[in-house]
Image (cartoon, grey):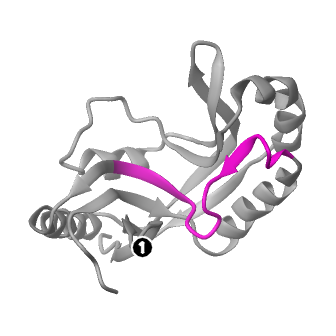
Amino acid sequence: MDVQFPLRSVFLALPLEGQPKWQFQALQEELQSFADILRFQNPQSPHLTLMFWPGVGALECKGIGEQAQKIASLHAPFAMKVTGAETFGNRGEDHVLFLSVAFSDELARVKKTCPWSDGRPFAPHITLARVGHPQRFNTVKKKVMKILEGTAFDIPVDRLRLYAEVNGVKQTPLEDFVFGGK
């Protein structure tokens, strides 16, 4: 893949693969009747973001990759648990529809070994969609949340994945870092 630096929208995440990815896609399918209000997360790359950088140069990207390899080597595979669906936003308007992920010791350890911080508390979640029209969303929120009611499934995690916007394609996977710990 031909990567031009600086890269935009770079992030390190825990990807959903296999069955959890299909479950994520099925939830988005169930919400298709609201596509005029929701901008869906890329169904090919569902993930839980650990760290986001708006832009990075070649040396910084190399350093992120080296750190990610070190982090992955410290951890054994584990499972995250989706425990429902929620929204967040501000000033009484919802901006993001997401899957809640239970905080676990394993997830906390992975996050803690990340040497970067954006100064915000870590709130583990998987974005399903961004709310394109908050006022219109308010009128259908109960219906949307009813569809997502009871959503719960496990997500086996065995790697970190580095993503970036490449040639205008957002969330392009750049590299995987497989967990090696015991």
Magenta highlight range: 34-51
Counting the numbered discs, the total is 1
Task: Give the amino acid type for the residue marked by disc 1 in the picture.
Answer: Pro
The image quarter in which residue 55 lies: bottom left
The image quarter in which residue 133 lies: top right
Q: Position of residue 143 (x, y in %)?
A: 90, 34
Which residue is tagged 1?
A: 173
The residue drawn where x is 52% and y is 58% is 47
121 left or right of 4?
right
Q: Secondary structure at mark 1?
A: strand
Q: Look at the image and say whether residue 106 sits in the magenta stretch.
A: no
The residue drawn where x is 64% and y is 75% is 18
From the image, which quarter does the C terminus lie in?
bottom left
The residue drawn where x is 67% and y is 38% is 132
Q: Are there few (<14), some (14-19), or many (20+) residues within 10 Å of tag 1?
A: some
Q: Position of residue 103 (x, y in %)?
A: 49, 40
Q: Position of residue 24 (x, y in %)?
A: 70, 60
71 left or right of 179?
left
Q: Position of residue 158 (x, y in %)?
A: 44, 70
Question: Residue 19, relative to residue 154: is it above or below?
Answer: below
The outermost residue toward the top is 91
State the residue in front, 74 or 56: 56
The residue drawn where x is 86% and y is 24% is 139
State the residue in front, 2 or 120: 2
Question: Residue 4, relative to residue 124: is it above or below?
Answer: below
State the residue in front, 10 or 26: 10
State the residue in front, 14 or 112: 14
92 left or right of 156?
right
The image quarter in which residue 37 lies: top right
From the image, which quarter does the N terminus lie in?
bottom left
The outermost residue toward the front is 168
107 left or right of 118?
right
